[in-house]
Image (cartoon, rainbow, N blue to C red):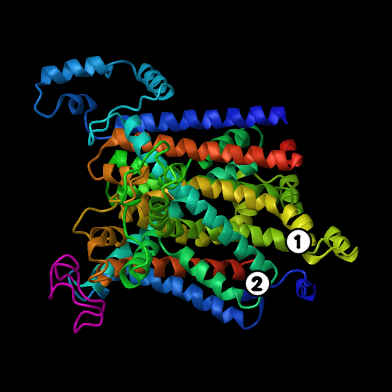
Amino acid sequence: MLRFLIRRLAGAVVILLILSFLVFVLEHIAPGDPARAYVGANASNATVAAQRQLLGLNDPFLAQFWRFLLGLVTGDLGRSLRTRQAVTADIATYLPATVQLVVAAFLIAVVLAALFAVSGALRWPGAFIGRGVLLLLATAPPFLLALLGLIVFFGRLGWLPARGTGDFEDPGPTGMQVVDTLLHGQGDAFLDALHHLVLPALVLSIAPAVAIGRVFRSSLQGVLHVDYVRTARSKGLTEGRVLARHVVRNALGPALSMAGLQLGFMFAGVVVVEQVFSWPGIGNYLAASIPVDDFPAIAGVTLVLGAIYVVSNAVVDLLQAAADPRVTVQ
Amino acid sequence: MTTLLPKSRIRPIAVGGSKLARPVAWGLIGLLILVTLVAVFAKVLAPDNPIQPVGEPNLPPLAAGHLLGTDQIGRDLLSRTLIGVQASWLSALAVVAGGLLVGGIVGLIAGATGGWVDTVLMRVTDLFLALPGALVAIAIVAALGSGLTNTLIGVSIVWWPYYARILRGEVKALAARPHVEAARLSGVSRTRLLTRHLLPGVVPTAIVTASLDIGNVVLLLAALSFLGLGQQAPAPELGADTARTLSQLLSQWWVPGVPGLAVLVLSLIANLGGDAVRNLLPVRR
């Protein structure tokens, strides 16, 4: 187990290094001169040259990469060309809203996936309609789902708000409105925050729900008829107990690893959803940086979201190894 | 209790499993071909110039002369959608074909050669697979500058490893089969072994993997286009057209809605067609 842990973590570190190298190379290719961005468009060529020297842009490639890595470790991701702030500070401002959205969407996705899988494996009558709708929605592009949600729940019914995280000042300290308002016991603001969260989270949850649900259903179907389940049934366990203790527990493995993968994907997929709902998160920050070629910001978001993706995959692998020791042998 | 006991252990997949379903599968594959034809001949099929205003702005669908209505400056939405479909569908096919080619070569070489070549190639593949593809694609396109060619390059770079992994596994399994062993013992050259004895065996898997993948690529390309990483205005593009007209959603839903729905239709046809291909070809599931 310890060897597996060390190997898996080392693997994650290597992937993170490759990701940073990739982003570093892209930053070199990207149009725009970082030195000129620092001193402004009207600066003389001499000032720009001096700034180049100061920023170390004349150093050898590998030396620059080393400094880039050191910057990463100390939390320095450069300066955004658009907001003129440190990218790290920007991301720290916007990340909590994204985490809140993704976690909420993930919880919804898990519930939907469980319903999808169990209703399919146990052939609940009539449930195929729900599954069909879910499958259809999952083939739609996320932005179309968002539009559909807005037309129905905001435009027609007027039940849910269209944009933002809530009409109140976030009291801190986490930056996640739902958590903060709860911590401060502000009931109205909490409900308002929740109200704003529902639609974007639902839109974001559909695709992962189906992906997890399909895997879970097929592993449930595989386990449902093995001998030890028949034994459990024939020794007189109630159906619920058979399901809970013998079926679901053994079928959970593949679904768990799919869930981990999807959690990572959601951090990438959140960009479009945040843009449609004007959600003040890191995805919206990325979407706003793209049209103005703000590459330091794009690179920073790619690194942070990429790191979350790599780490969440590693954590899921370790969780699986903890749950099922056979995994470590491979 | 009785509801839990199945009629048979493994339920046959609906499409292709029974006699009735074969025509359905062929129909779905016909749909794939039809979409491809529409995409190829979109310029001929488009009734109007897609980037010139040709009528009143914001006409609803089914308006006279404009089947899908017009957009905010009076351009024909049917024409714009057709040209957008062309860009989306042909790009998706190009990405899948590129991924199949590069991933196929890597997978074939790794699987057939084995040894350190296999190890090195698969390590590189795994590294690519461990990165978040969509994000890396966004970063690559942002660095290269937005545009259709750069989008295709960016997506292709993150897309091939998937094929390399699957095809390598397939080749490995095939290489252990008796007919390959017999060929090797009879002394055929490495090239012949690869092209005559291994390659034909992986073609069904390759086709199925690729056809199931088209829908994913359509969605990814639409998302990149939505974020402004595709062609520049005024060229019609499904994702970007939706993003630019979001403000009209509640007043004239069809202006952002039609291009978005077109993406849904493409993705749906791609997924159904992919399923049909899988059911018609003899591939392990």
Q: A300 and A86: which one is in front?
A: A86
Residue A146 appears in the rendering: yes
The x and y percentages for residue B30 are: 47, 75
Q: Residues within 10 Å of mark 1 (few under 14, many from 20)?
A: many
Label 2 sits on residue = B13
Residue under circle 1? A243
**Residue found at x 66% / y 73%:** A124
Image position, residue A30 (x, y; %): 28, 34
The count of marks equals 2
x%, y% of residue A281?
Answer: 36, 44
Report how far apart the C-alphas of labels 2 and 1 lie in the structure. Answer: 25 Å
Q: Which amino acid is tagged 1?
A: Leu
Image-quadrant location for residue B242: bottom left
x then y, percent, for residue A188: 39, 53
Q: Quadrant of residue A50?
A: top left
Mark 2 or 1: the one toward you: 1
For residue B33, above or below residue A297: below
Q: Main secondary structure of the magenta part?
A: loop
Please state the extent of the stretch shown in magenta in the rendering.
Answer: B50-75
**For residue A101, above or below residue A217:** above
